[in-house]
Image (spheres, rainbow, N blue to C red):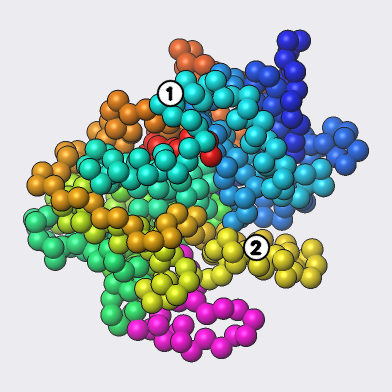
């Protein structure tokens, strides 16, 4: 694996996080490459061994052994510290050919290690400095705060879109398509889904962005408030919501009609899809459930709602079952009346609503709830925005510190993913409001619209979601024209087939968020 002119700088045990797979690996950083060797590890004596399968009870992997991924350091565009299970133990490497590798760093006893992560991160930054400066010539890669403020100013001045700015914030807050438990989160922006025409000049068609989903309906808001006020468990702080607006389950729920998500849904449901009555079938019903339904549904949206019409169609003819009450076979997503049955029309109008004057004037209020000063503490309590303690980094750290045994620690860890995870808290004060502008930029969901502003010095994208056969294996070799990461394996694994017998379908590319420089 290591060439004669290459020198090993770091050896570390790690997990590669990809889609929903957590694969034990051995990470090597050499003078020229990042190498990820699957199912191999170093033990406490420094000997190369088969990676243990019981180190993390929540880990699931379908990747084969004797496989490795090799990424040339010359292709690295960005390096980020990341979180895993609300602990600062991960690092993500983004390449110029679109591959993003998310690694959770372990020590020799196979425990999550922030110290080892920092060593890996610092070695990567030191080794890749020249390449990072090539992609960020206008500034030092460590000037995180200046970069963030620069992006914020561009957004205020309408130099980048709302979509782009939300992608920036998601990346800054540690959200990444590589980890479905930390997938980028977007807001519901509309509440009108029954009218034949959509008047985007009418404020009444918009959702109240100053309130979380649990507070959109006054009656339901009062139920959540009552639950919080009457909480009486001395061992667990009070919270409004026992579920979350974003989780792996939410991502799979929305993207069930596209691969690899159809197969993932079946795989994590024991080989078959859930009952049709519980699957995503209608935009209007999804809004009603999340805004006025029972106390368990407070889902927000994902980026695909603003750029990808394919996920609204059952283009692969996946057998989604039959709805019990209507006898209707579940197929395409039922669209609002104003979309006239056209997914592209829905995406275009939905994107226009996101980029318009009303949303632009109120988006800062939603940012305060999700990424800012109303995420936790007294302001969150007043805003009806308090979640289960294990959805916060501070709650996880506190719970693990108080655990009396390894069994108790594992029990805590196993609860983190199902509860969902709050993004990192980016702002300690109210977020600035966007300046008024009479004519917002075009809202058509073009490829350029989902990327970085034309001519900008910051440019990076997350990797495309791979097909089912590569969901947990090394990524496919990119086109020859780009610097290539290489994967070696005799036969890539396959995800379990869904209940549909349709041929392998096209894959949904995630929106390419823009990532900040190394910090």
Asked if the residues shown at circle 2 and circle 1 are in contact, with their CB atoms under 8 angstroms apart, the answer is no
Q: Is residue 71 left or right of residue 426?
A: right
The quadrant the N terminus occupies is top right
Residue drawn 40% across and 48% down?
169
Residue 373 or residue 48, whichever sits in front: 373
The mark that comes first in sequence, 2 or 1, is 1
The percent position of residue 218, horizontal first and vertical second, equals 28, 80
The percent position of residue 23, horizontal first and vertical second, equals 67, 41
Q: Does the magenta stretch include residue 239?
A: yes
The residue positioned farthest toward the top in the image shown:
4
Q: What element carries label 2?
A: helix
Q: Visible in this render: residue 366?
A: no
Characterize the local packing of mark 1: few (<14), some (14-19) or many (20 or more) Cα atoms within 10 angstroms: few
Above or below: residue 68 compared with residue 224: above
**Majority secondary structure of magenta residues:** loop
* The image quarter in which residue 399 lies: bottom right
The percent position of residue 423, horizontal first and vertical second, equals 48, 55
Q: Find disc 1 in the rendering and name its residue.
A: 137
Above or below: residue 48 compared with residue 212: above
Residue range of the region highlighted in magenta in the rendering: 222-249
Circle number at residue 111 = none
* The image quarter in which residue 375 lies: bottom left
Q: Is mark 1 on a helix, strand or loop?
A: loop
Q: Find disc 2 in the rendering and name its residue.
A: 397
């Amino acid at each position: 694996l290591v060439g004669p002119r290459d020198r090993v700088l770091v050896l570390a045990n790690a997990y590669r996080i990809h889609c929903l797979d957590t694969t034990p690996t051995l990470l090597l950083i050499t003078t020229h490459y990042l190498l990820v060797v699957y199912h191999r590890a170093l033990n406490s004596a420094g000997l190369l061994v088969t990676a243990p399968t019981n180190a993390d009870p929540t880990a699931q992997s379908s990747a084969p052994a004797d496989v490795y991924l090799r990424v040339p350091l010359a292709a690295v565009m960005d390096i980020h510290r990341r979180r895993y299970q609300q602990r600062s133990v991960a690092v993500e490497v983004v390449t110029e050919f679109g591959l993003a590798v998310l690694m959770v760093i372990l020590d020799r006893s196979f425990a999550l290690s922030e110290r080892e992560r920092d060593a890996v991160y610092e070695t990567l930054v030191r080794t890749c400095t020249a390449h990072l400066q090539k992609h960020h010539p206008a500034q030092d890669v460590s000037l995180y705060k200046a970069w963030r403020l620069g992006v914020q100013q561009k957004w205020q001045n309408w130099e980048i879109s709302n979509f782009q700015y939300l992608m920036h914030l998601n990346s800054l807050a540690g959200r990444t398509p590589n980890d479905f438990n930390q997938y980028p989160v977007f807001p519901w922006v509309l509440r009108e889904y029954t009218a034949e025409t959509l008047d985007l000049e009418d404020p009444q068609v918009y959702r109240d962005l100053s309130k979380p989903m649990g507070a959109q309906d006054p009656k339901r808001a009062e139920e959540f408030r009552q639950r919080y006020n009457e909480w009486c468990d001395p061992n667990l702080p009070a919270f409004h919501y026992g579920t979350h607006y974003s989780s792996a389950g939410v991502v799979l729920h929305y993207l069930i009609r596209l691969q690899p998500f159809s197969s993932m849904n079946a795989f994590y449901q024991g080989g078959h899809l859930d009952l049709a009555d519980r699957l995503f079938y209608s935009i209007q019903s999804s809004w009603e459930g999340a805004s006025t339904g029972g106390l368990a549904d407070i889902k927000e949206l994902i980026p695909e709602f603003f750029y990808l019409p394919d996920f609204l169609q059952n283009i692969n003819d996946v057998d989604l079952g039959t709805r019990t009450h209507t006898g209707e076979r579940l197929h395409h997503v039922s669209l609002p009346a104003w979309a006239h049955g056209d997914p592209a029309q829905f995406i275009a109008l939905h994107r226009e609503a996101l980029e318009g004057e009303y949303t632009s004037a109120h988006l800062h209020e939603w940012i305060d709830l999700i990424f800012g000063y109303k995420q936790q503490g007294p302001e969150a309590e007043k805003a009806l925005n308090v979640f289960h303690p294990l959805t916060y980094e501070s709650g996880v750290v506190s719970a693990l510190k108080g655990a009396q045994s390894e069994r108790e620690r594992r029990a805590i860890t196993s609860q983190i993913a199902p509860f969902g995870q709050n993004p990192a808290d980016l702002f300690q004060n109210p977020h600035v409001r966007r300046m008024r502008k009479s004519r917002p930029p075009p809202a058509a969901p073009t490829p350029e619209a989902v990327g970085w502003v034309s001519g900008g010095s910051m440019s990076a994208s997350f990797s495309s979601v791979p097909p089912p056969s590569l969901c947990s294996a090394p990524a496919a070799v990119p086109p020859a024209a780009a610097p290539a990461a290489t994967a070696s394996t005799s036969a890539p694994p396959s995800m379990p087939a869904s209940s549909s017998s349709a041929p392998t379908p096209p894959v949904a590319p995630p929106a390419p968020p823009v990532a900040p420089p190394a910090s």
